[in-house]
């Protein structure tokens, strides 16, 4: 059976020690000012009139129906059979169309590579049978990762033992594979995904932009004059020139 990788976050065990963020930064050499994962603090006053804080670890949700894949004109954003959503940096143009398409704000343009970066569940580590760096370093054991299709896995057992929630709304329900345990507390609206224009245009982009690839670069230039698409055109032209140079040699 094909694996179905999911991440569980027990918000009652998270202490916002930043170990997960530091481990992720070290694992991926993330530029300063950017992060593949984070912990969001939500302050509120409880029913007794006392202040409380809820902590929500966050990252790419590796959705079943990822809009970031739909809007990607080059096909650089793609989803593996086991559920992990990845970016092929060899063909990513850095056009950033996928950035606003993500309702979880999990994507950003890496200023060093000029390609899109995001959490990949530490895919290279997973393929070696290891845990994601954030999970391995979580001192409170708030993060649990594994194969939900394996009935003997820790995530399968925990999903049955506790009431878990997903970050979904009536407007945004794209099958995230990140679960949260809050001990029965409602998840604040500030943590929920946000719908935006680019997210709404995902299907349109998939039906129009991607097919234009078969019409050639000229067709794309005629329809899309934005800076992001120009990056894609320039990148493909550069690749073509390099291939022609190799053939001459």
Image (tube, rainbow, N blue to C red):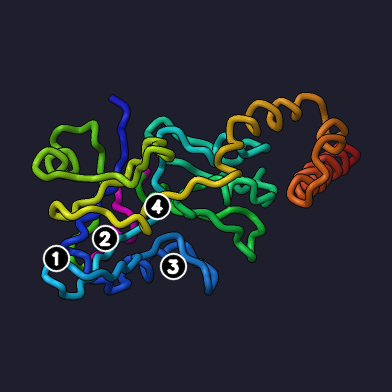
Name the disc covering residue 25, or none: 3
Name above or below for residue 169 compared with residue 50: above
Say whether marks 1 and 2 touch (CB < 8 Å): no
- In this view of the protein, which residue sits in the foreground, 225 or 4? 225
- Residue 131 falls within the magenta-colored stretch: yes
- Bin the neighbour count of mark 4 within 10 Å (Cα to Cα): few under 14, some 14-19, many 20 and up: some
Label 1 sits on a secondary structure element that is: loop
> Which-is-in-front pick, marks 1 and 2?
1
SS category of the residue bearing label 3? helix
Q: Quadrant of the C terminus?
A: top right
Q: Earlier in the sequence, mark 3 or mark 2?
A: 3
Q: Residues within 10 Å of mark 1 (few under 14, many from 20)?
A: few
Q: Which residue in the protein does label 1 denote?
A: 47
Look at the picture and state if 231 lies above or below 147: below
Q: CA distance from mark 2 to mark 4?
A: 11 Å
Q: Alpha-carbon distance for marks 3 and 4?
A: 11 Å
What residue is pinned by disc 2? 136
Image check: 31 left or right of 64?
Answer: right
Q: Which residues are magenta?
A: 127-138
Pick whichever of labels 1 and 3 is earlier in the sequence: 3
Q: Which residue is mark 4?
A: 122
User: Who comes first in sequence, dot 1 or dot 2?
Assistant: 1
Mark closest to the chain's N terminus, 3 or 4? 3
Q: Residue furthest right?
A: 248
* Number of other residues with Cα within 10 Å of mark 3, as a class: few under 14, some 14 to 19, many 20 or more: some
Give the structural element (helix, strand or loop) at label 2.
helix
């Amino acid at each position: 059976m094909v694996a179905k990788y999911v991440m569980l976050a027990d918000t009652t065990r998270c202490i916002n020690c930043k170990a997960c963020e530091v481990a992720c930064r070290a694992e991926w050499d993330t530029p300063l000012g950017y992060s593949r994962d984070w912990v969001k603090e939500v302050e509120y006053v409880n029913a007794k009139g006392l202040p409380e804080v809820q902590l929500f670890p966050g990252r790419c949700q590796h959705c079943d129906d990822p809009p970031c894949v739909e809007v990607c004109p080059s096909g650089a954003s793609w989803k593996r059979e086991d559920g992990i959503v990845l970016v092929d940096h060899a063909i990513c143009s850095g056009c950033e169309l996928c950035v606003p398409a993500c309702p979880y704000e999990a994507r950003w343009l890496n200023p060093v590579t000029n390609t899109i970066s995001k959490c990949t569940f530490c895919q290279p580590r997973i393929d070696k049978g290891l845990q994601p760096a954030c999970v391995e370093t979580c001192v409170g054991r708030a993060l649990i990762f594994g194969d939900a299709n394996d009935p003997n896995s820790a995530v399968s057992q925990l999903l049955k033992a506790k009431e878990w929630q997903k970050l979904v709304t009536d407007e945004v329900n794209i099958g995230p594979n990140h679960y949260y345990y809050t001990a029965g507390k409602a998840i604040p609206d500030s943590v929920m995904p946000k719908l935006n224009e680019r997210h709404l245009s995902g299907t349109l982009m998939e039906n129009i932009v991607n097919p234009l690839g078969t019409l050639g670069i000229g067709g794309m230039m005629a329809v899309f004059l934005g800076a992001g698409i120009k990056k894609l055109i320039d990148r493909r032209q550069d690749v073509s020139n390099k291939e022609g140079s190799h053939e001459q040699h």
